[in-house]
Image: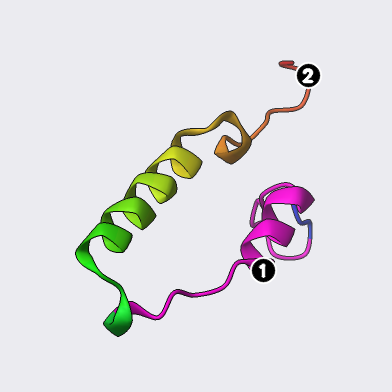
Amino acid sequence: MNGATGIERPPLGIRLLHALRKEPDWPTMTAEELIAYRDAANRAAGSRAAEPTKAGTR
């Protein structure tokens, strides 16, 4: 937790991955590419890496 703002931030690795991820070119994507992107985003959101960790529980 950031003492100055009171906002909890995700782990550094998650912040770095998010910062390095490129935004897709939505207008040029085919339906198949959109489905693949959606599936990949759902897998990433459901992974353990996306879960916040609590100190002392693991």
Rendered-image quadrant of the C terminus: top right
Residue 48 figure quarter: top right
Point 68% across, 58% down: residue:
17
In the image as oriented, which residue stretches furthest toward the left?
Answer: 31
Does 21 lie within the magenta span? yes
Point 67% across, 68% down: residue:
19
Label 2 SS: loop
Point 68% across, 51% down: residue:
14
Horizontal side of 27 relative to 10 (left or right) equals left
Q: Amino acid at mark 2?
A: Gly
How many residues crowd around disc 1 within 10 Å: few (fewer than 14), some, or many (20 or more)? few
4 or 13: nearer the eye?
13
Q: Amino acid at mark 1?
A: Ala
55 or 29: nearer the eye?
29
Residue for badge 1: 19
Residue 7 position, x and y percent, is 64, 57
Please name which of the two marks, 2 or 1, marks the residue nearer to the observer. 1
Label 1 SS: helix
Residue 12 position, x and y percent, is 78, 52
Point 25% across, 58% down: residue:
32
Label ID, residue 56? 2
Does 17 lie within the magenta span? yes
Horizontal side of 53 relative to 26 (left or right) equals right
Residue 46 figure quarter: top left
Label ID, residue 29? none
Which span of residues is magenta-colored?
A: 4-26
Figure check: 35 above or below 29: above
- How far, Cα to Cα, is label 2 from label 1? 28 Å
Residue 40 position, x and y percent, is 43, 47
Specify which label sits upstream in the sequence, 2 or 1: 1
